[in-house]
Image (cartoon, grey):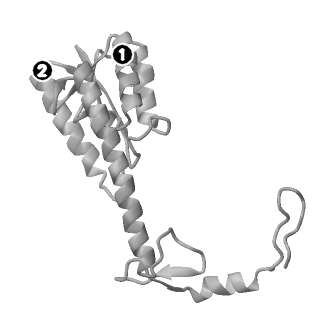
Amino acid sequence: MKAAIYARFSSDKQTDRSIEDQVALCRTICEREGLIVTAVYDDRAISGASTLNRLGWQRLMRDAKAGKFKVVVAEALDRISRDQEDLAGIHKRLQFAGVEIRTAQDGIAGDIHIGVKGLLGSLYLKDLAQKTRRGQAGVIRDGRHNGGRSYGYRAIPGKPGELEIDEAEAATVKSSPTTLAPDRHGTSPPP
């Protein structure tokens, strides 16, 4: 039986090696179960909260609909999606195409796996968001910078969240005209 492997990691702070490790694990499963790997799809540094921006997943779904394989193999269901609704919809569409999902964690994914793992994935994302906001609030309370890079400043090595003025960039900012652009109604803001 033909199989496709899907691998994903969610953060640019993780390593590309994660994909290779997931694919190796899935290839072992395929060998053990007599599945022939015909394609490998992946999404790197993309959250499992949605499938909209995952080009690898979208290609996999098109190929599943076209009948190019009968099994999708992944390390775990949360690699496919952490969103409860998405995971249920994916499962339903793959079933309609005659494609089953198998994972290293659960084997063949049935309705109960999809329901329980979808719920757990959604709860994980909600918990992660709360912890992230708490951490960001702590950084701000400490008087440190909580966002991305700001032009005119640079990070101080060894001092996370602390910035210093980048004189070269600051000179550009200081020499820029101070006139602000008109708003969407064509009205210029007061000086």
In the picture shown, does residue 180 fall above or below 170? above
Q: What residue do we see at 89% from left, 64% from top?
A: 187
Graded by Cα atoms within 10 Å as few (under 14), some (14 to 19) or many (20 or more), the crowding at tag 2 reads: few
Which dot marks residue 115?
none
Observer able to see residue 62 = yes
Observer able to see residue 9 = no
Q: What residue do we see at 88% from left, 56% from top?
A: 185
Disc 1, disc 2: CB below 8 Å? no
Left or right of 76 on screen, residue 122? right
SS at badge 2: loop
Query: Which quarter of the figure has residue 107?
Result: top left
- Outermost residue toward the left in this view: 32
Quadrant location of the N terminus?
top left
Q: What residue do we see at 39% from left, 26% from top?
A: 60
Q: CA distance from mark 1 to mark 2?
A: 18 Å
Q: What residue do we see at 38% from left, 11% from top?
A: 96
Residue type at the position of mark 2: Glu
- First in sequence, mark 1 or 2: give its number: 2
- Name the residue tied to disc 1: 68
Graded by Cα atoms within 10 Å as few (under 14), some (14 to 19) or many (20 or more), the crowding at tag 1 reads: some
Residue 68 x %, y %: 36, 16
Left or right of 138 on screen, residue 32? left
Query: Which quarter of the figure has residue 152?
Result: bottom right
Residue 160 x %, y %: 38, 78
Residue type at the position of mark 1: Lys
Residue 9 x %, y %: 32, 46
SS at badge 1: loop
In the picture shown, does residue 13 fall above or below 5? below
Residue 103 x %, y %: 20, 29
Quadrant location of the C terminus?
bottom right
Which dot marks residue 33?
2
